[in-house]
Amino acid sequence: MTTRRSRGEGGLHFDDDRQRWIATVTVGFDARGKRITRKRSATSKTDAKDKLKEMRRDLEDGVVLATSGYTVTEAVRDWLAFGLAGRARSTVTNYTNIAETRIVAPLGRRKLRDLSAEDVDRWLRAQSREVSTRTLRLMHSILNRAVVRAMARDKVKRNVVVLCTVPTGQAGRPSKSLNLVQAEALLAAATGSTLHAYIVLSLLTGARTEEVRALRWEHIDLAGSPDATPPVPPSISVLRSDRVGGDTKTKKSRRRFAMPRRCVDALTVHRARLGRAPDPTALVFPTRAGTEMDAHNVRRAFRAVAKVAGLDASAWTPRELRHSFVSLLSDSGMPLEQIARLLGHSGTTVTERVYRHQLRPVLEEGADSMDALFPTSEAG
């Protein structure tokens, strides 16, 4: 005679409708005192017993049993819905597109509890043939955070994603900078366009494109104080940017710097087009509706100017005006430390590694010093 299992050991029965063996355990009770159960099914009684033993072992180890049918798609979409609070709309759109096309499409139907490190490794390796290393890291991060959220809600027992290393992907489009001839051609092509002052200001001050979009007239001093002691030149104050909350990228990015004469002239013409004195709180570069331009607005107008300048319009973006600012100043001999201050960088590492694309002028100090220490001896 079969001995009945004692309470707490779970149950095992055959479901005639499904034609499967069902293993059931009680994992606790809800606030109303209703029993909470977890079930696993199998085609054979032996397999069902093994699943019952596994569930009991998890309970003894203090592990809350995961929902068996919860998929990668559900985990990722749950994170997209609740894990991106406070992010910019463009960031949410970007993450959603990557998640749907690069994670949900190839992995979405996989049950989260069955997802293995091998599955993740194979997925990353396959994707590395199509996307850049940066995108691969973002994909890995999204899946990792989705699984972490699922773990916190008892949907899965462990996170295998964190065990996997991101491989090297395809080479991304390298940033580049305009040379002096290209920069002059761009400035000439921009003359008379609605983006003229925007391009002049971005190229000649190195301000980030999101900082320029957020500029208001109260941030710009076109006259300065020439009679002051010492004289105060025309200047621009970078206090805000087109980011969530309006803050600049870093604290160092909040800065005030003098404007070149060409910037003053371009902004003076730009203001004159308004036909009246602008409200100090008004945007310097608004849309026709008076709102802040987004990156797409600027990129589209910029590429039209780049085409007139004889550049490959599809190969250049407004962000590279900042790169050009660094390289042109470096080429003229300005020390990297001074360039970093103008950019709002806390040090020279990012300036050197990311922005400077020219290694000129030739650094002669070391050679001059060594020549003085070790003068060339005349051949006897």
Image (cartoon, grey):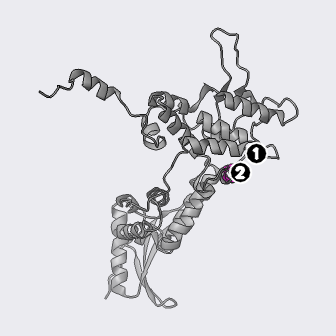
Q: Nearer the viewer, residue 43 or 322?
A: 322
Identify the element where label 1 is drawn. loop
Q: Amino acid at mark 2?
A: Ala
* Residue 165 appears in the rendering: yes
Please name the residue shown 56% across and 67% down the image: 100
Q: Considering the image in quadrants, where does the C terminus appear?
A: top left
Q: Give above or below for 183 relative to 62.
A: above
Q: Nearer the viewer, residue 323 or 214?
A: 323
**Label 2 – label 1 distance at C-alpha:** 9 Å
Q: Residue furthest front?
A: 380
Q: Give above or below for 78 relative to 281.
A: below
Is 344 part of what is drawn in magenta?
Answer: no
Q: Amino acid at mark 1?
A: Ser
Residue 169 locus on image (x, y percent): 42, 62
Q: Which mark is residue 193?
A: 1
Q: Which residues are magenta?
A: 294-305
Q: Give above or below for 23 relative to 178.
A: below
Residue 331 locus on image (x, y percent): 48, 35
Tell whether 90 sits left or right of 369. right
Residue carrying label 2: 301
